[in-house]
Image (cartoon, grey):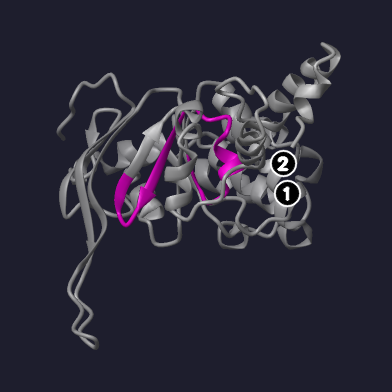
Amino acid sequence: MNFVKDDKMIRIEDLVFEYGWDEEEAAAPVNAVDHVSLEVERGSFTAVIGRNGSGKSTLAKNINALLLPASGRVIVDGFDTLDDAALWEIRQRVGMVFQNPDNQLVSAVVEDDVAFGPENLGVAPDEIRERIRFSLTAVDMYAHRKMAPHLLSGGQKQRVAIAGVIAMKPEIIIFDEPTAMLDPEGRAEVMGIIERLHEENITVVLITHFMEETLNSDRIVIMDRGRIAMEGTPAEIFSRTAEIEALDLKLPFAVELTARLKERGIDIPAGLITERALSEHLLTLWKGNETSDLCPSE
């Protein structure tokens, strides 16, 4: 087994992943991920966003070796995904939550579903019971531990799926569009869990097409046609509104509103990208008897 001592949790080096020839249509191979290099810090929250077909989910599946590079390398906590002997080490370190919660639940009872992963890792029964308690409590689903998953809402099912990953105690959790099939309430619940996991020093990689879900991340990576189009902190990324719109991505509400207020001559400091931060600033202007700045004359 090859092990490379590394200070990065994930190191992606010139990664290429291609889908093969389509014999019926005689189509050439397509680089779904096209020479991508990326580093993810230990304990960080990285959001990867892009349109459908941008390569973001393919990138995610290369991190836990569900897919393997055509060229380049993916190093996870020092282990190379191309090293067959390292796959067990990688899979123990990387948990993954997918888009459709129904496709992730395998048992007829919630607590049995959460136990499934640790059982396959050979964890002792007493430890499994403690992990069930801990992980279901973490996602506020312990009271539902005896229920059948099919009786739960979509958001509750996704929380159980996340609990199943937490129970395996991974160091990295990849969320591949986990809120795409949920209603706004379910989305908010799942995002709250993701942010709490980040606060507990879990390395989080969130794949999403909802811009608002990236606002509390440490770093945003925007992908387009298999390549990294933009990369930076949320404040850096959302200062480049024209470039984001050119990629056919919708700006978060607060960022779009800030741009319109600036066009009307209202002084908005850089870096106000959340609705709360923007509303607090506007309230400060109003309290400071500067309401005229909020409604400048035409």
Along the line of sight, the residue nearer the viewer: 99 or 277: 277
Residue 224 within the magenta-colored segment of the rendering: yes
Query: Spatial distance from mark 1 to mark 2, Cα to Cα?
Result: 5 Å
Tell me which residue sits at (21%, 46%) in the image.
Answer: 15
Residue corresponding to mark 2:
189
Residue 129 lies, with reference to residue 65, above or below; the image says above
Residue type for callout 2: Glu
In the rendered image, the residue lying farthest to the bottom is 24
Residue type for callout 1: Gly
Residue 49 % position (x, y): 46, 46
Residue 172 % position (x, y): 44, 33
Residue 169 within the magenta-colored segment of the rendering: no
Q: How many marks?
A: 2
Tell me which residue sits at (41%, 53%) in the image.
Answer: 57
Along the line of sight, the residue nearer the viewer: 240 or 48: 240
Along the line of sight, the residue nearer the viewer: 283 or 47: 283
Mark 1 residue element:
helix
- To which quarter of the image does residue 14 belong? top left
Quarter of the image with the N terminus is: top left
Stretch in magenta = 206-228
| Number of residues whose C-alpha sits closer than 10 Å to that of mark 2, classed few (under 14), some (14–19) or many (20 or more) | some
Residue 150 % position (x, y): 73, 63
